[in-house]
């Protein structure tokens, strides 16, 4: 591999931003893009009425409801680094898409609202990061409003998430009395709401302000110094190794909306975040981004209709090794088929540019005519292999779905097929009548499905909820008899024609297992 490609790969930093809805994730994404010069005018997320939509919320339903429901990918250059951000949906119903996105990054940034602390959604996503052992950086947001005491937030981080925290900086005051942050790492004080010239104040050897300043007279300054003394004496030690292993999270305080503390966070993040990491194949080989010369990558997401004017589908590929060049030949490991890639794209939410080359760590989009599936591996040589499977999640909510207009069966089936391949919703059908049943992790997935069927496929659907079910797949399908199916243990097929039992509740599942001890059931994640 040439040293130029190696340098390019080592300059990549690819991360996902995770948080609870409304913690300010999309706002911080926009401010980062602003520093990278990727957008000139951060459309504040609040400004829905003004027609100024957040750059990264592109789908119609997101603009209407003001939440991110699909993951978007953005890229910018800063200080010699090429940064790829994956903005994940904060809405809990979209956890499936979010979980898969976390498989495509090398580190994660967790945004926490200072007033609310750690919320259920953040905890779920955090567990996936821990499962992968990726480094996690924490940004405590909304310091321009009143919130919990900083020491309380740090304690909560450590107790609820079971990770050690190291505050890289510390707030001086909060809300209306927010004066700035004491930067432990850069040894300076950064003032809030001041001009660029007076933004940073130096700290002396003793850790106090080295210049005369009215801030010294405030109780907030004194309190911050007391807290810093406590952290220095009793807090965790800084450890690069701990960060790399995902055992220590560096914590930053700031306010994304007022663009305070974001640049300091970005610059420090780039110093400690990992370059692209190796991935494991199904036969347990490590594919190293630099040492493995040939191009390889995996598809972690498929998105239809990013451009409403054209019915298009894009497969999002995380490049694991080597270099991608437009026009190159690629082999899809699952089928062994080779093809030439002439259309490829990179993203700033819905502004897409054709990409001619990209390297390990980058995310590219390949135009898809129905060839790809989520989890597919693509390679640039004839020698194929398959990366580890991406986790699939067991749905809990189910609906029967039909087209309102019988004449629109063709669009109905086409729409369902495409949205199912995107992984937005899971598809089942009854054995003989072949009625369509959809499964989801959360209710919002059904609403988005209905909205997109109507807007993108011009088909209105009728959905009849059949409630919460426990879905279980079967290890020994040949022993299953149709007579085992009943209203409380419905036998259906999934989109790959595997048999699945949908049980009414835990009791029905236990009763079934006692009566049919030879049937071995299993669940997805």
Image (spheres, rainbow, N blue to C red):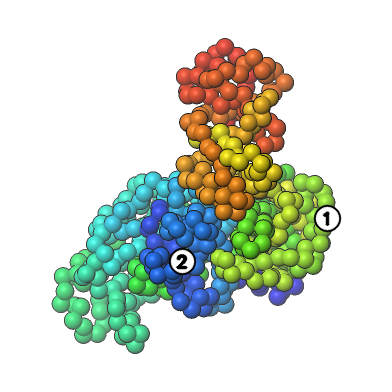
Can residue 417 be seen here? The reply is no
Image-quadrant location for residue 172 = bottom left
Location of residue 303 in the rendering, given as x and y in whole percent from the top left corner: 62, 55
Q: Residue at x 77, y 66 (%)?
A: 342
Location of residue 195 in the rendering, given as x and y in whole percent from the top left corner: 32, 85
Q: Which residue is mark 1?
A: 338
Q: Which residue is mark 2?
A: 54
Location of residue 416 in the rendering, given as x and y in whole percent from the top left corner: 63, 44
Q: Residue at x 80, y 55 (%)?
A: 331
**In the picture, which quadrant includes the N terminus?**
bottom right
What is the spatial separation of the Cα atoms under label 1 and label 2, in whole angstroms? Answer: 38 Å
Nearer the observer, 90 or 169: 90
Q: Within 10 Å of the Cα at label 2, are there few (<14), some (14-19), or many (20+) other Cα atoms? A: many
Q: Disc 2 on helix, strand or loop?
A: loop
Image-quadrant location for residue 435 = top right
Q: Within 10 Å of the Cα at label 1, are there few (<14), some (14-19), or many (20+) other Cα atoms? A: some
Can residue 43 be seen here? The reply is yes
Looking at the image, residue 133 sits to the left or right of residue 311; the answer is left
Location of residue 122 in the rendering, given as x and y in whole percent from the top left corner: 42, 50
Above or below — where is 147 with respect to 126? below
Q: Residue at x 66, y 41 (%)?
A: 407
Q: Residue furthest top?
A: 515
Nearer the observer, 86 or 210: 86
**In the picture, which quadrant includes the C terminus?**
top right
Above or below — where is 179 with respect to 96? below
Q: Disc 1 on helix, strand or loop?
A: strand
Above or below — where is 349 with respect to 430? below
Nearer the observer, 507 or 231: 507
Q: Are marks 1 and 2 in contact (CB under 8 Å)?
A: no
Looking at the image, residue 485 sits to the left or right of residue 32; the answer is right
Q: Earlier in the sequence, mark 1 or mark 2?
A: 2
């Amino acid at each position: 591999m040439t040293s130029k490609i190696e340098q390019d790969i080592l300059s990549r930093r690819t991360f996902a931003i995770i948080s609870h809805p409304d913690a300010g994730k999309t706002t911080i994404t926009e401010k980062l893009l602003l520093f990278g010069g990727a957008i000139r005018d951060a459309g504040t997320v609040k400004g829905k009425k003004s027609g100024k939509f957040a750059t990264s919320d592109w789908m119609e339903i997101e603009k209407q409801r003001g939440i991110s429901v699909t993951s978007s990918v953005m890229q910018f250059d800063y200080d010699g680094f090429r940064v790829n951000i994956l903005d994940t949906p904060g809405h809990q119903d979209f956890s499936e898409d979010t979980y898969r996105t976390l498989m495509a990054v090398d580190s994660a940034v967790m945004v926490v609202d200072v007033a609310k602390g750690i919320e259920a959604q953040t905890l779920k996503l955090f567990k996936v990061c821990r499962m992968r052992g990726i480094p996690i950086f924490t940004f405590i947001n909304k310091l321009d409003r009143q919130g919990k005491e900083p020491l309380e937030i740090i304690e909560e981080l450590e107790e609820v998430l079971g990770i050690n925290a190291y505050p890289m900086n510390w707030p001086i005051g909060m809300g209306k009395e927010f004066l700035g942050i004491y930067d432990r790492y850069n040894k300076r004080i950064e003032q809030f709401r001041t001009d660029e010239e007076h933004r940073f104040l130096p700290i002396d050897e003793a850790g106090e302000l080295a210049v005369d300043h009215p801030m010294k007279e405030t109780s907030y300054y004194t309190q911050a110094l007391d807290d810093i003394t406590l952290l220095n004496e009793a807090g965790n030690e800084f450890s690069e190794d701990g960060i790399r292993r995902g055992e220590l999270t560096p914590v930053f305080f700031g306010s994304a909306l007022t663009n305070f503390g974001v640049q300091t966070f970005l610059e420090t993040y780039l110093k400690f975040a990992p370059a692209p990491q190796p991935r494991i194949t199904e036969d347990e080989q490590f594919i190293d981004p630099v040492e493995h010369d040939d191009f390889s990558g995996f598809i972690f997401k498929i998105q239809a209709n990013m451009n409403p004017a054209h019915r298009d589908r894009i497969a999002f590929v995380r490049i694991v090794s080597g270099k991608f060049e437009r026009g190159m030949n690629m082999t899809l490991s699952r089928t062994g088929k080779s093809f030439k890639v002439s259309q490829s794209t990179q993203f700033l939410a819905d502004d897409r540019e054709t990409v001619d080359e990209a390297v390990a760590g980058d995310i590219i989009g390949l135009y898809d005519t129905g060839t790809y599936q989520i989890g597919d591996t693509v390679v640039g040589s004839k020698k194929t292999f398959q990366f580890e499977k991406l986790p699939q999640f067991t749905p809990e909510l189910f609906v029967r779905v039909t087209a309102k207009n019988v004449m629109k069966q063709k669009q109905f089936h086409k729409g369902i097929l495409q949205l199912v391949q995107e992984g937005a919703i899971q598809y089942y059908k009854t054995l003989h009548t072949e009625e369509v049943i959809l499964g989801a992790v959360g209710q919002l997935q059904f609403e988005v499905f209905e909205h997109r069927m109507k807007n993108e496929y011009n088909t209105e659907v009728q959905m009849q909820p059949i409630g919460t079910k426990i879905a279980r797949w079967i290890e020994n399908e040949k022993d299953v008899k149709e007579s085992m199916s009943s209203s409380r243990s419905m036998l259906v097929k999934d989109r790959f024609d595997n048999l699945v039992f949908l049980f009414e509740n835990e009791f029905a599942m236990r009763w079934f297992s006692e009566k049919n001890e030879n049937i071995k059931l299993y669940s997805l994640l």
